[in-house]
């Protein structure tokens, strides 16, 4: 029989279930779709999906994918697709993210550069994040200011990976280069119509306005900068000691159950169910933060010793 772990002088052992649902409210603008006054509505005619006949709602701009990413290894914890509105707002629900988790926000769109939040975000039951307020909201400030100074926007122009994996048009490679320019020229030559990734402005036709944005993007060679993994112990997600036997989240912080009135200077260990040690630390004060860690959803074993 395999022994997962052995502890001596165990004061307390508890199984924790971490699970909940969170709502993420984003505000973002996409360079090619932007027409002024904080809107992406084709100068009042409607969003791209509406103009292309895909949606009857004039406020529907386009589908985006928003992923919540583990800062420790950049693994995607959960990805959700939704429809961005003409005013730049979108609300998305995540079923496997624990309130209080620290995640990097990653946004993907079919002809814009993938853009990441500048740093891990504390994801609460209802979280707001506004990319438009400052370029510092995006990793490496990878955005551009709108022509009317109404907000920061995601760069447009990543429409091909011709020079990377070779999949061609509408498969992105995270850079605006000659492959994107070639695909734009081909689409412009026939004035491609409908819901096409080369239609950067979202007005259902590829014309000179799309070409101009692509030309500017290729001239600069814009890159979808990706953050590096962050040391898990550097994330300020505090776990508190509590007298409760149930793991809950209050104000974004996990409560770890501990017997009441236990003395200080005890060792605390957290294991996953495979027996892998997640963290081991010393509890100096019951009422204070005992360690910093980001916990993904799941069941854990918490052991207080000493």
Image (spheres, helix red, strand yellow):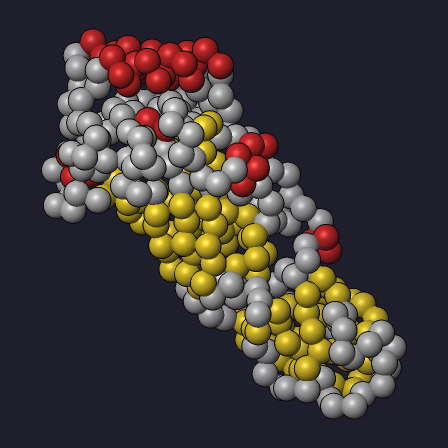
**In this view, 32 is above or below 241:** above
Residue 249 versus residue 146 in the image, above or below: below
Task: Report the residue at 41% width, 49% height from top.
Answer: 26
| Residue located at (51% from left, 63% from top) | 124
Looking at this view, is 240 or 133 the one in front? 133
Is the residue 13 above or below the residue 30 in the image?
Answer: below
Residue at 37%, 12% (x, y): give it. 215
Is 282 rendered above or below residue 43? below
Where does residue 280 sit, x and y in percent of width and height? 78, 67
Does any portion of residue 48 appear in the rendered image? no
Q: Nearer the viewer, residue 226 or 285?
A: 285
The mark tally for this picture is 0
Asked where in the image residue 119 lies, by quadrant, the reply is top right
Q: Where is residue 143 in the image (x, y as percent from the top left)?
A: 48, 30
Q: Is residue 208 visible?
A: yes
**Residue 272, image x and y in percent?**
64, 68
**In the current view of this chain or complex, which residue is farthest to the bottom?**
260
Question: In the rendered view, does 209 fall on the left or right side of 25?
Answer: left
Percent x, y of residue 118: 57, 41
Residue at 21 percent of width and 15 percent of height: 207
**Quarter of the figure with the C terminus:** bottom right
Q: The N terminus is located in which quarter?
A: bottom right
Residue 191, quarter of picture? top left
Q: In this image, 292 relative to 41: left or right?
A: right
Res 199 quadrant in image: top left
């Amino acid at each position: 029989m395999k022994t997962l772990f052995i502890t001596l002088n165990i004061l307390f052992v508890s199984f924790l279930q971490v699970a909940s649902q969170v709502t993420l409210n984003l505000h973002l603008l996409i360079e090619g779709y932007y027409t002024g006054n904080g809107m992406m509505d084709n100068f009042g005619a409607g969003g791209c999906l509406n103009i292309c006949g895909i949606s009857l709602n004039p406020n529907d701009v386009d589908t985006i994918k928003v992923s919540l990413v583990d800062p420790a290894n950049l693994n995607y914890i959960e990805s959700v697709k939704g429809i961005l509105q003409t005013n730049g707002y979108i609300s998305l629900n995540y079923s496997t993210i624990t309130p209080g988790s620290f995640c990097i926000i990653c946004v993907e769109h079919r002809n814009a550069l993938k853009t990441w939040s500048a740093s891990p975000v504390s994801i609460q039951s209802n979280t707001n994040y506004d990319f438009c307020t400052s370029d510092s909201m995006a990793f490496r400030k990878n955005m551009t200011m709108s022509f009317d100074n109404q907000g920061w926007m995601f760069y447009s122009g990543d429409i091909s990976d011709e020079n990377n994996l070779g999949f061609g048009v509408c498969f992105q490679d995270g850079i605006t280069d000659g492959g994107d320019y070639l695909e734009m020229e081909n689409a412009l030559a026939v004035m491609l119509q409908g819901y096409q990734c080369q239609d950067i402005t979202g007005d259902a036709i590829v014309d000179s306005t799309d070409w101009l944005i692509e030309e500017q993007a290729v001239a600069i060679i814009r890159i979808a900068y990706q953050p590096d993994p962050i040391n898990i112990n550097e994330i300020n997600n505090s776990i508190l000691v509590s007298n409760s036997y149930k793991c809950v989240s209050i104000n974004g912080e996990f409560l770890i159950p501990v017997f009441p009135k236990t003395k200080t200077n005890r060792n605390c260990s957290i294991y996953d169910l495979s027996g892998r040690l997640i963290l081991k630390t010393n509890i100096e004060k019951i009422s204070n933060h005992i360690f910093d860690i980001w916990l993904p959803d799941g069941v854990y074993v918490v052991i207080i010793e000493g």
